[in-house]
Amino acid sequence: QVQLVASGGGLVQAGGSLRLSCAASGRTISSNAISWFRQAPGKERVFVAAIHWSGDSTYYVNSVKGRFTISRDNAKNTVYLQMNSLKPEDTAVYYCAATSYGTWPPRRYDYWGQGTQVTVSS
């Protein structure tokens, strides 16, 4: 199985930046893609971004395009989410998830990290 550890969250002011990390271990060869989700207080969990583990393909929700960048470091088995120009509405718990399925963009996930809190103040 695959284990995911999310980290890098914190408190920043609007317009600031944060870099989230998702470190993967275990049978990472079975993971075709890793995605970031977020869940704001009182809201549903929503998709943010995805990256294919064995390629350069990326996919973003429209609300973060131009502000967020998803990337990977294969040597460290780690996926990053660079978040710039943060807005208060970006406040949420951010989760990373991995999928062993081959659909692109991914739609089904079988591994989840614990989440990391991102708070953006006005």
Image (spheres, grey):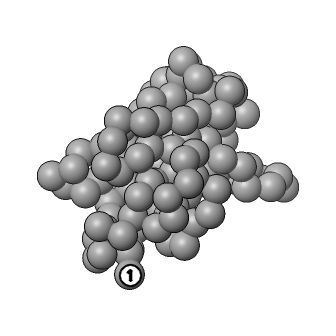
Q: Nearer the viewer, residue 93 or 66?
A: 66
Work out whether residue 28 can be spotted: yes
In the rendered structure, the answer to whether residue 9 lies left or right of residue 88 reads: left
Q: Nearer the viewer, residue 55 or 92?
A: 55
Percent x, y for residue 121? 64, 32
Work out whether residue 114 can be spotted: no
Percent x, y for residue 29? 29, 67
Residue 73 position (above or below residue 101): above
Residue placed at 45% from the left, 30% from the top? 69
Residue 82 position (above or below residue 4): above
Q: Residues within 10 Å of mark 1 (few under 14, many from 20)?
A: few
Give the residue at the far front of this rendering. Answer: 102
Q: Amino acid at mark 1?
A: Gln
Percent x, y for residue 107? 64, 56
Residue assigned mark 1: 1
**Secondary element type, mark 1:** loop
Percent x, y for residue 112? 52, 69
Residue 2 position (above or below residue 92): below
Give the residue at the far left of this rendering. Answer: 75
Give the quadrant of the N terminus.
bottom left
Q: Nearer the viewer, residue 74 or 100?
A: 100
Residue placed at 51% from the left, 44% from the top? 50
In the rendered structure, the answer to whether residue 48 lies left or right of residue 75 reads: right
> Which image quarter: residue 32?
bottom left
Residue placed at 54% from the left, 73% from the top? 110
